[in-house]
Amino acid sequence: MSLTSDQSSAAPTAAAQSPKIPNPSVARPSVDAGSFETAGAVRTDSLSIDSVPNGTVSTGTPVDPVVGAMRRGRDHLLSLQAEEGWWKGELETNVTMDAEDLMLRQFLGILTPSTATETGRWIRSQQLSDGGWATFYGGPSDLSTTIEAYVALRLAGDDPDAPHMRSAAEWVRSAGGIAASRVFTRIWLALFGEWSWDDVPVLPAEMTFLPPWFPLNIYDFACWARQTVVALTIVGSLRPVRSFGFTLDELRVPAPKAARAPLRSWAGAFERLDSVLHRYEKRPFQPLRRLALRRAAEWVIARQEADGCWGGIQPPMVYSIMALHLMGYPLNHPVISMAFRALDRFTIREETPEGTVRRIEACQSPVWDTALAVVALADAGLGGDHPAMVRAGRWLADEEVRVAGDWAVRRPTLAPGGWAFEFDNDFYPDVDDTAEVVIAIRRLLGGGHGPVDHSDGSGPGSAAATAASAAAEAAVAAAGTIAAADPELAARLRAAAERGVDWSVGMRSSNGAWAAFDADNVRTLVTKIPFCDFGEVVDPPSADVTAHMVEMLALLGRSDHPITQRGVRWLLDNQEAGGSWFGRWGVNHVYGTGAVVPALISAGVSAEHPAIVSSMHWLVEHQTPEGGWGEDLRSYRDDEWIGRGEPTASQTAWALLALLAAEPASGTAEWEAVERGVRWLCDTQRPDGTWDEPQFTGTGFPWDFSINYHLYRLVFPVTALGRYVTLTGRSTS
């Protein structure tokens, strides 16, 4: 595969290579990138068959308990595959998705009693004992979330004098009332006359005219923020006011006027700029304003996906529908009706003892989930020729993105390729999904999970382990590959993977690392504007995305390539002082470390390297007394929570993946940690093969927006157990 597509200004050349990373103590075989093939590693020391709960197959034959747990997880995962070939677990977030859906329908005049009742039932069920609503399981009440939930329940007909409503209103007032809520919440209230548009930060529609090189242009925002911002420039310019049918006086408390920040500060400068823009909003230059509104609307319409959504996520869908409606598009216009069909696709209805509940997913993750499922099943021993794997491969091939999107603004000559996160999001493929899909394709084509070899006769590479390794490799070969089942599909997947590698390499930022959606999206000036008081609005490189790219390139035999080496160096340079890595898209340091360590090991960094040694120590130190690993979302705000929390199946699996990649010696604290972690997974597995995990271990915006990926509790434990079984040479027959 070519790695010549990199267009970052700091792309390394053959004449100016990055410093080499110390070689591991064992030789690693050279792997042809086109073959997608490597060997696996096996060791013989492991948990005894009696050290975890017993398992049997249907015939009553005793089964190795770890193998049994792996099989149960594998079979449960297989049962969840859609007929078309994809997997998709629910993407659970918080009740603002549901509240804003009701407010949108009220704004448009289409809120029905049944929708309000079913949604209200769900929101009510999520209220905490103190009267508020949290943004993640086990978290504290959040002011803006609670205000929006309260409004939604008023729309559903709840009496403000009902005990649960009085409790909510009391909590809101104690937390500062409406005036202390975030900008997005106050925008929603301004739409219904419960907050003044004069007190909402201005996003003028004219900003769509700013060229990409100019500060504060729309492409300085991360793609998820960009789509929302452009739609909101229309809404904020037109300043509509509708009615809830009630007031929210019970949520107000006297709020002292905030003092202005010093002029010689970014906050002070932007406060003054916002004041100027508010004066402009009262008398905009109408010809320019009309042109700007038309340009913004055209920008929005051009980015609607085939299924009617925008970016595959809820916020730009909601604001785009509202913006286009305000621009005169009727609700039966194809653009609007398609958007509502997309919203319906994001809607979950569930029967409960209290009646039907209705909730909205903020996003859907079929490409991500399918890639992770393929890797998990491969680690659990499924060959690429298994019907489920063939269906998954065919679906992934069909999901390849072959058109240019917003990313081309920074990389205009880069050929398109790669994969997005969602069913339909061709404008915004991402590096993280692309790396994981390429790794999954490699597994479908017969590759193992790491380019490792233990032929030097030491440790796991002893005679016994070498024989076990050979047997394991033979088993993989016997299992077959997708090429045996469908040679034409295998060729399609190879070609798609090559394009995906070229595209993702070309999306590297100038510092040698990778972000999720854009290259060099690091201008932090946009974070200073008054509007940006919630979430992330830029997309800088992160350790977890960079790790997945480094791992992908290493697995394709490109460990020594300067591009890979620069990524490795960036990862080493960005290790946290305690030995972990920050997790941008998963919670948090356990996720980051679980991604980075396997990548570094795959790329040739020795397990004896100080960075790996310190990460191993960090993981051992943060293992819970029960044997698992857990990290609370509060670690994004409070260092005392880093690496600490209730143990979860997904986070335990991430820690195990890191430890197993380093292959600690028998008798060490690290190997004992592995055995305790595997035992914890076996002990906590449900009879149906999955695990309970109400905790949120996924991240949208650190702290501000958290995710419970319902498939994480299954795919990652199956992957970890599969790699443990392979490393220890346990019989799966």
Image: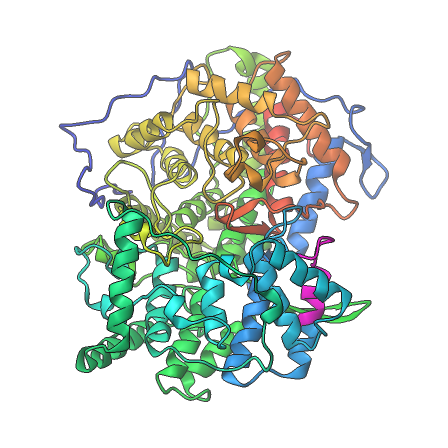
Q: Residue at x 35, y 32 (%)?
A: 557
Query: Going by the image, does 86 lie left or right of 279?
Result: right
Q: How many marks?
A: 0
**In the foreground, 294 or 621:** 294
Q: Is residue 83 visible?
A: no
Spot occupied by residue 316 in the image (x, y as percentages of width and height)? 42, 67
- Name the quarter where the C terminus is drawn: top right
Query: Going by the image, does 193 lie left or right of 7?
Result: right
Spot occupied by residue 125 in the image (x, y as percentages of width and height)? 73, 62
The colouring scheme, among rainbow, by chain, secondary structure or one colour, is rainbow
Spot occupied by residue 229 in the image (x, y as percentages of width and height)? 35, 64
Query: Going by the image, does 351 lie left or right of 336?
Result: right
Spot occupied by residue 147 in the image (x, y as percentages of width and height)? 58, 63
Q: Is residue 133 visible?
A: yes
Which of the 4 image quadrants contains residue 14? top left
Query: Going by the image, does 277 lie left or right of 391?
Result: left
Q: Residue at x 47, y 23 (%)?
A: 579
Q: Residue at x 62, y 13 (%)?
A: 666
- Residue 121 lies within the magenta run: yes
Location of residue 219 with respect to 266 vertically, above or below: below
**In the foreground, 46 or 367:** 367
- Name the quarter where the N terminus is drawn: top left
Q: Which residues are magenta?
A: 119-132
Q: Of all residues shown, which one is farthest toward the right?
A: 60
Location of residue 506 with respect to 202 vertically, above or below: above
